[in-house]
Image (spheres, rainbow, N blue to C red):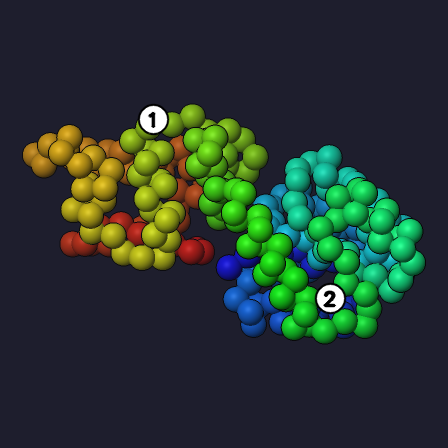
Amino acid sequence: MAKLLVVDDEDKIREMIGKYAVHEGHEAVLACDGKDALKHFKEEDFDLVILDVMMPEMDGYETLKKMKEIKEVPCIFLTALGQEYDRIYGFDIGAEDYVTKPFSLKELMMRIKVILKRENKTSNKITVNGLVVDEDAHTVTVDGERVDMANKEYELLLYLLKNIGNALTRQAIISKVWGYEYDSDDRTLDTHMKLLRKDLKDYGNYITTIRGVGYRFEKEI
């Protein structure tokens, strides 16, 4: 599942894309113009942006430029423009693809799938709303702020996220994160889980205790 930002000033098109994206298993956030899109973009993390070119006040080109000043994200432009210059300009400022109106929703979703597959090959990031774990950089950020945590807490978080939505037994967690280092007579797991919840701030609420079993990192709360 990917989190998509759909930006179009035409209500029907915007809502149609959003509904189809949800049907395909994605999460879709809808924005009616460039200003609205930037507000969402600053507050949330997205895997891909679907951006209309022809919008009032701030067009898609200007919106994408401002987005890239904040962070990099793949973008598909929606456009009624068919001129070669317009497409080249869009690619020059960082668009991944173009879809010309009118378009097939099925084709749009296939293009999204191709881009996301390519991005996942080059990125080892796990994202849950504003929580981002970068395996390559070995970093954790919460709503854009870097969080420093002990190595065991990081490994614990990574294991929970790689099994998001699944109930994990205490023994499974201990075996994966501590292995033979774990002393079964103490409360090491519970202590680390408490520290992890504190480090994650509001996202600590995503970690639920399953009485008599273990823990689970929820997909949403």
- What residue do we see at 92% from left, 58% from top? 83
- Relative to 35, does residue 194 appear above or below in the rendering? above
Q: Which residue appears at 52% of the width and 42% of the height?
A: 123
Quarter assignment of residue 198: top left
The percent position of residue 39, horizontal first and vertical second, equals 71, 46
At which x and y percent is residue 30?
A: 68, 60
The residue at the point 29 percent across, 31 percent down is 152
Residue 53 at x, y = what percent?
Answer: 84, 56
Please name the residue that numbered disc 2 is placed on: 14
The amino acid on which the numbered mark 2 sits, given as a three-letter code, is Arg
Apparent side of residue 49 relative to residue 160 in the rendered image (left or right): right
Q: Is residue 149 above or below residue 11?
A: above
The residue under label 1 is which amino acid type?
Ala
Q: What residue do we see at 66% from left, 48% from top? A: 74
Viewer-closest of 123 and 14: 123
Q: How many residues crowd mark 2 within 10 Å: few (<14), some (14–19), many (20+)?
A: many
Splitting the image into 4 quarters, where does residue 82 fall? bottom right
* Residue 219: image location, x then y, percent: 42, 56
Q: 49 or 114, which lies in front?
A: 114
Q: Residues within 10 Å of mark 1 (few under 14, many from 20)?
A: few
Q: CA distance from mark 1 to mark 2?
A: 43 Å
**Does 19 sit left or right of 218 as displayed?**
right
Mark 1 and mark 2 lie on one chain; the one further toward the N terminus is 2
Q: Left or right of 30: which side holds 63?
A: right
Residue topped by disc 1? 150
